Image: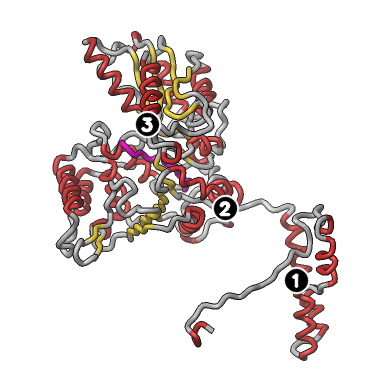
């Protein structure tokens, strides 16, 4: 039809369910006339086989033999399934050879890159290809700023760290694929991994031009159908472990319309079907006064689906730590470009794959304090699960009155308030601030060590989200477990009160609430 008339065709097929939804369901309860008619209707198999017999295509004996053979095979497989034990070979295709199952220890690896390599990659990805003679003026400025970052090795922002992670993986023959709404320029106009000529409309990707024979880089803007797009990217990630596949939501709460894919496939796929995936979800999250629909990626939902035990302090030595291997996924809320660089590279620099959920920032993309150096990404470095207080501007450890644990961009607001108070008083602060970068699996050992370091201090958990949201419900019991065998400390909550809405819709109210929680945390 399409080849002859060059038009689409719609086939209207009327279908019906012969039996109920399950073994005890009976459709006759509510549709008696319909199901009397259905009961009289011969099955498709019966109608088709009778047609073939009437035409002389097959004999009734052949039909009976085939039917018996198929039903016999089904019955045999059903009996075998009752005693089946899954084996590694059943989920490892040839492209997945070398990947470890959770019961095989996988050592932790460094994810840093030599400074020479970082500079070489940085120079390539901060150069607009010459075939684009008229890029947008702002884009040219951004690329010039990135070139300066590479030249100095300091002041690297979030977007630059991301592209260095991508570029280094591409040079290691790891395919990188990024999809989502407006990912080419980034929702917050920060990424610009695809450059467009303002006159010809031609486009180019510097990440595709780093070196000969590098792996492929793909950045594609997707439609506003999160359920469909995330489902596709999950399937893509299952094909091979030698790739980094990322899906970015325009705002974190856009993941709501992909919840089925997240709940039924991503968070539980390995336990259900013994299939590993290294898919990365980038979900912009943070309270900036933009209202309920643009503030929260619903961190609490992802943490609630994490399967680690809050009451068990697992083995944490480097030679035996298997938290991520045995867990169902990882959830991070990182605060430095370098740590973001490492957590992306970590996805492919290990002998197994696990989904990664990133509460990605918004205002940190251009925050003057949220910058990193080449040294923090250099050889011998790796992802930091928790960043302790540096001690700068702080009293001696034994004199610290309070230690505030937090995660994400609220750290910088706490830090600025602490610095301002110290400048006003001329005295070092007696409040330490520690950042939990990997919330799940929980860094029990790092939290315990910070508690031991400040053994005379009160412990506080500070968050921007309401009390019934964010990480509080998850970290509370785990912090107690971390401290149980040593100091016996229990964390106190500081943050917004419980709310049905994730945030207020008024900027003035947001500012008031934010100032109040920062003040209370440091008081």
Task: Identify the magenta region.
Answer: 353-363
Whole-percent x, y for residue 448 in the image: 45, 21
Whole-percent x, y for residue 418 in the image: 29, 18
Quadrant of res 221: bottom left
Q: Quadrant location of the C terminus? A: top left
Whichever of callouts 1 and 3 sits on the residue coming sooner in the sequence is 1
Callout 3: helix, strand or loop?
A: helix
Residues at marks 1 and 3, CA–CA distance in whole angstroms: 66 Å
Q: Is residue 206 left or right of residue 401?
A: left
Residue at the image point whose x is 22% and y is 15% from the top: 423
Q: Which residue is mark 3?
A: 507
Whichever of callouts 1 and 2 sits on the residue coming sooner in the sequence is 1
Q: Residues within 10 Å of mark 1 (few under 14, many from 20)?
A: few
Q: Is residue 197 above or below residue 395?
A: below
Q: Quadrant location of the N terminus? A: bottom right
Closer to the observer: label 1 or label 2? 1
Q: Which residue is mark 1?
A: 70
Residue at the image point whose x is 26% and y is 12% from the top: 428
Residue at the image point whose x is 42% and y is 51% from the top: 247
Mark yes or no: residue 96 visible. no
Closer to the observer: label 1 or label 3? 3
Closer to the observer: label 2 or label 3? 3
Say which mark, if any, is on residue 88: 2
Residues at marks 2 and 3, CA–CA distance in whole angstroms: 53 Å
């Amino acid at each position: 039809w399409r080849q002859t008339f060059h038009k689409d065709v719609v086939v209207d097929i009327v279908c019906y369910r012969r039996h109920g939804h399950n073994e005890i369901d009976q459709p006759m309860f509510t549709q008696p006339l319909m199901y009397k008619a259905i009961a009289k209707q011969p099955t498709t198999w019966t109608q088709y086989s009778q047609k073939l017999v009437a035409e002389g295509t097959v004999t009734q004996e052949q039909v009976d033999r085939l039917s018996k053979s198929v039903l016999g095979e089904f019955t045999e497989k059903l009996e075998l399934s009752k005693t089946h034990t899954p084996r590694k070979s059943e989920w490892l295709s040839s492209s997945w050879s070398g990947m470890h199952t959770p019961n095989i220890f996988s050592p932790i690896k460094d994810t840093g890159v030599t400074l020479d390599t970082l500079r070489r990659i940085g120079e390539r990805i901060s150069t607009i290809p010459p075939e684009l003679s008229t890029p947008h003026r702002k884009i040219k400025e951004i690329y010039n700023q990135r070139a300066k970052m590479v030249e100095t090795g300091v002041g690297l922002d979030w977007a630059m760290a991301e592209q260095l992670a991508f570029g280094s993986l591409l040079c290691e023959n790891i395919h990188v694929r990024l999809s989502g709404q407006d990912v080419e320029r980034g929702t917050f106009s920060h990424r610009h991994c695809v450059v467009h000529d303002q006159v010809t409309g031609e486009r180019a990707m510097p990440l595709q031009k780093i070196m000969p024979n590098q792996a492929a880089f793909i950045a594609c803007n997707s439609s506003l159908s999160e359920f469909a797009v995330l489902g596709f990217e999950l399937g893509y990630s299952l094909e091979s472990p030698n790739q980094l596949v990322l899906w970015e939501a325009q705002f974190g709460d856009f993941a709501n319309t992909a919840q089925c894919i997240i709940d039924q496939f991503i968070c539980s796929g390995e336990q259900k079907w013994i299939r590993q995936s290294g898919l990365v979800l980038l979900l912009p999250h943070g309270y900036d006064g933009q209202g309920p629909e643009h503030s929260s990626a619903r961190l609490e939902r992802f943490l609630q689906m994490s399967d680690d035990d809050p009451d068990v302090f697992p083995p944490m030595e480097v030679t035996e730590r298997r938290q991520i291997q045995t867990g169902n996924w990882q959830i991070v809320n990182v605060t430095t470009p370098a740590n973001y660089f490492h957590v992306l590279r970590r996805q492919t620099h290990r002998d197994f794959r696990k989904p990664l959920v990133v509460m990605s920032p918004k205002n940190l993309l251009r925050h003057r304090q949220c910058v990193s150096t080449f040294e923090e990404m250099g050889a011998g470095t790796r992802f930091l699960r928790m960043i302790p207080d540096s001690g700068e501007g702080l009293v001696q450890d034994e004199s610290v009155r309070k230690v505030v644990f937090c995660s994400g961009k609220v750290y910088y607001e706490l830090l600025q308030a602490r610095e301002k108070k110290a400048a006003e008083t001329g005295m070092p602060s007696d409040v330490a601030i520690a950042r939990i970068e990997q919330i799940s699996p929980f860094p029990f050992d790092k939290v315990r060590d910070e508690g031991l370091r400040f053994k005379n201090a009160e412990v506080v958990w500070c968050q921007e989200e309401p009390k019934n949201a964010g990480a509080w419900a998850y970290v509370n019991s785990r912090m107690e477990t971390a401290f149980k065998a040593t100091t016996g400390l229990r964390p106190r909550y500081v943050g917004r009160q419980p709310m049905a809405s994730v945030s207020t819709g008024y900027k003035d109210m947001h500012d008031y609430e934010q100032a109040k929680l920062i003040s209370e945390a440091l008081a």
